[in-house]
Image (cartoon, rainbow, N blue to C red):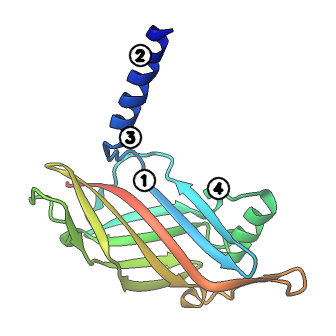
Amino acid sequence: MKYRVKIILIIFLATAFISSIKVSVVSKNFLNIKIKTNIDEIEFKQIIKNNNALYCNQTLGKYNITIPVKEFIAPNKMIYDDFVEMLKGNEYPNISIYISKSILNFDTNRDTVIYPEMTINLAGVSKVDKTLCHVKKISSDSCYIYGEKKLLFTDFNLLPPTKLFGLVKVSNDINVKFGFIFVKN
């Protein structure tokens, strides 16, 4: 009995110690889109399948991130279909994001905050906007950029949809969270 109590106490103390340690693991490129309705919030998640780092397109001098609209994960099939329709995914199958190569400083030895100009192509419309990004250094030639951006459907000539004869209304606000690994080349 005493042996069991000691083991439980050791496990409890070890668990308490481990839970106080913070570990940051960078393993995936992702883009999440959250929208609000008059009833609920809905989040659409996209984990970029290759999970590889993003390389600069030398001809454009920019990093190009292409995200297929139809590869987002939605809470259910009906909401997924509405999401694809809402973003005109059949006509414009990808969301593209461009970030200037010159904004990333791979030579710094510390984590930084940057405010790069990003070009976002959604539903055939481009919007250029500055976005607050956190940069976490991974190695001498790679970094992880993550952040959050608020956009509007109307920025991309999209009307927030209504469903069920107007009972469910989608807000004009779009909240985007992202994280991408970039490699110097």
How many angstroms separate mark 1 from mark 4 (CA)? 14 Å
SS under mark 1: loop
The residue that mark 1 highlights is 29
Residue type, label 4:
Ile
Q: Nearer the viewer, mark 2 or mark 1?
A: 2
The residue that mark 4 highlights is 73
The percent position of residue 158, horizontal first and vertical second, equals 64, 86
Is 172 situated left or right of 56 in this image? right
Is 35 situated left or right of 12 in this image? right
SS under mark 3: helix
* Proximity of marks 3 and 4: CB atoms separated by less than 8 Å: no
* Proximity of marks 3 and 2: CB atoms separated by less than 8 Å: no
Residue type, label 1:
Asn
Q: Nearer the viewer, mark 2 or mark 4?
A: 2
SS under mark 2: helix
In front of the other: 23 or 167: 23
Q: Quadrant of residue 25?
A: top left
Q: Earlier in the sequence, mark 3 or mark 2?
A: 2
- The structure residue drawn at horizontal position 58% and vertical position 84%, both measured from the top left corner, is 173
The percent position of residue 162, horizontal first and vertical second, equals 79, 84
How many angstroms separate mark 1 from mark 3 (CA)? 25 Å
Residue type, label 2:
Lys
Q: Earlier in the sequence, mark 2 or mark 4?
A: 2
Q: Nearer the viewer, mark 1 or mark 3?
A: 3
- The structure residue drawn at horizontal position 59% and vertical position 91%, both measured from the top left corner, is 154
Q: Earlier in the sequence, mark 1 or mark 3?
A: 3
Taking 182 as reference, is 99 above or below it? Answer: below
How many angstroms separate mark 2 from mark 1 (CA)? 43 Å
The numbered disc on residue 6 is 2
Q: Which residue reaches farthest front?
A: 2
Is 136 situated left or right of 174 in this image? left
- Of the 4 image quadrants, the one containing the C terminus is bottom left
